[in-house]
Amino acid sequence: MRQSSFFTKTLKTISSEEQSKNAQLLLRGGFIYKNSAGVYSYLPLGWRVIQNISQIIREEMNAIGGIEMLMPALVEKRYLDITQRSAVDIGFSVAGHDSGRAPYILGWTHEEVITEIATRYIQSWRDLPVAAYQIQTKFRNEPRAKNGLLRGREFIMKDLYSFHQSKEDLLVYYETVRRAYEAVFARVGLKAYYTVATGGDFTMSTTNEFQVLADAGEDTIYYKEGSSIAFNQEVVEESGEYDVSDFQKGSAIEVGNIFPLGTKYSDAFDLRWQDENGKKQKVYMGSYGIGVSRVMAALVEVSSDERGIIWNPAVAPFLVHIIPISDDSAVIREAEKVYEALKGEGYAVLLDDRNARPGEKFADSDLIGIPFRITVSQKTMEQNGYGLKLRDKDEEQIYSLPDLKQHIALQR
Ligand code: ATP
Ligand code: MG
C-alpha cells in the first residue's frame, strides 16, 4: 500500500489527558482516533493490527473445534432478566421507540443469548459437545475509561462458549482452551501468565486469567519465573488458600479470562440433553474471552522505545516499510521495483511515496513501528542493493534483492 493513500497522518503531540503509553503512541501514530472517553475509531493502520490479531485468534479457535458466528449487539433486556443480570450497572440501556421503557441493553457479554439459541439445537447426546465463538464489539459503562484501549466503553472481544454432557468433558475442554490461549498469546508476541482468579460475576468457583506484566496493568499478580501458574492478588487475599511467599508481585494486564460456568446459564434457560434412555440431563458450559483491542494496547505497553512502537511481525500493520530517501526519479523507480518484488512474495508492504524530508519519513517509520525498514537511495543503488534495518536494531546493512528476500523470510 502507498502511504499517500492514507488519509491519516502522524501527530507530533496529542492532548495531555491521554497518559497511557498505548493511547499516546496509537493516537500519535494514526492507529486510532478518540471519539469520546473510552470510545475509539480504528483508523486504517490500527484496523490492520486488529485484523491480524483477530485472524490469529480465529485460527486457534478453529483448531480446537470452535465455530465462528455473530450474535446481536442489541440484546433485549429479557435475556438478562432471566439470570438477574439486567441490573448490572456495567450495561448501557437503550430505550425503544414504541415504549417509554428501556427494552434493550447493549451487549456486554453473551452467555444468555447463546444459551437461548442452544436450546433450539441441543436436544440429545448426539448434539454435544458444541463450541461457538464470535469476534464482536462489546459495550460496558466502565466508570474509569482512562487507559486508552486497555479499558474501553466500546471494545472488541472474542467470546467462545462451550456446551458439554458432563463436568468432566467441560474440564477437559477447558484445558484445551487454555492451551489454545497460550498459543494465541505466544503468536501475537505476549508473555501471558496463566493466573488463578476469583469467580467475578459469572460463577462461584475460581476462574483463570491470562495476565501480561506491565506497569499500566490494573491487576496485581503473584508470579514466578518457571512456574506455570500465577495468582491474582484478589484470590490470594479472599481465599487465603495460596502460599505465595516465594512469588514476585507485579502489575499486570488481563488479556483473557476463562470461566467454567457449570450449569448456571443452562439451568436458567432450561437447556437439557436427553441421554440414550430418554432421561433429561444437565448441560455444562464454559465461557472464554479475549480482549482483542486490549491485546493491541498490551502489545504497545510492553514493546516500544522513545521513538515509537515496536510491533511483532505477526501483528504489525505491515511487515516491510520502504522509504525512498530522495525524490530523484531513478530512486523512485528503484523503490517501486523492490515494492512490487516484495508484494509479489506475499508480504504486506508499505511504500512511503510522500513528498517529505528523509528525517520526517524515518521518524514516522519509527513511530508506527513496522518491523523491516528498507531504504533506497543513490548510495544503496551504487552498491547494487537496498538498506535493511530492523525496527528494534540500530545498524542498517546493504543487501541485494535475493539476499533481502531471504533475510526477511528468515526473520519474520
Ligand atoms: P476486567 O477485569 O478487566 O474488567 P472482565 O474480567 O470484566 O475484565 P471479561 O468479561 O472476562 O472481562 O471479558 C473478557 C476479556 O475482555 C477480558 O479478559 C479483557 O481482556 C477484555 N475486556 C474486558 N473489559 C474490557 C474493556 N472495558 N476494554 C477492553 N477490553 C476489555
Ligand atoms: Mg476479569
Image (cartoon, rainbow, N blue to C red):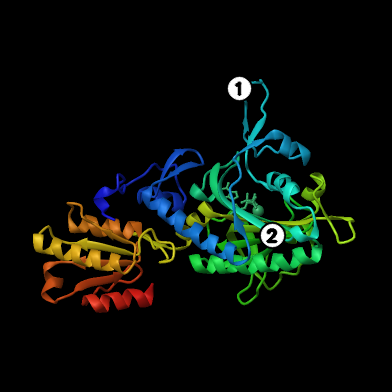
Residue at mark 2: 233
Real-space CA distance between mark 1 and mark 2, rounded to the nearest whole angstrom: 45 Å
**Viewer-nearest of labels 1 and 2?**
1
Give the residue at x 72% y 39%: 80
Residue at mark 1: 97
Question: Where, quadrant-wise, is the N terminus in this rendering?
Answer: bottom left
Answer yes or no: disc 1 within 8 Å of ligand 1. no
Q: Is the residue 257 above or below the residue 14 in the image?
A: below
Mark closest to the chain's N terminus, 1 or 2:
1
* Residue 164 placement (x, y as % from top left): 76, 60
Give the residue at x 70% y 38%: 88
Q: Is residue 258 left or right of residue 403?
A: right
Judged from the image, the secondary structure of the residue bearing numbered disc 1 is loop
Q: Nearer the viewer, residue 213 or 409?
A: 409
* Residue 138 placement (x, y as % from top left): 58, 44
Q: Is the residue 89 above or below the residue 98 in the image?
A: below
Rate crowding at label 2 as few (under 14), some (14 to 19) or many (20 or more) other CA atoms within 10 Å: many
Amino acid beneath label 2: Gln
Q: Nearer the viewer, residue 119 or 93?
A: 119
Q: Is residue 89 left or right of residue 294?
A: right
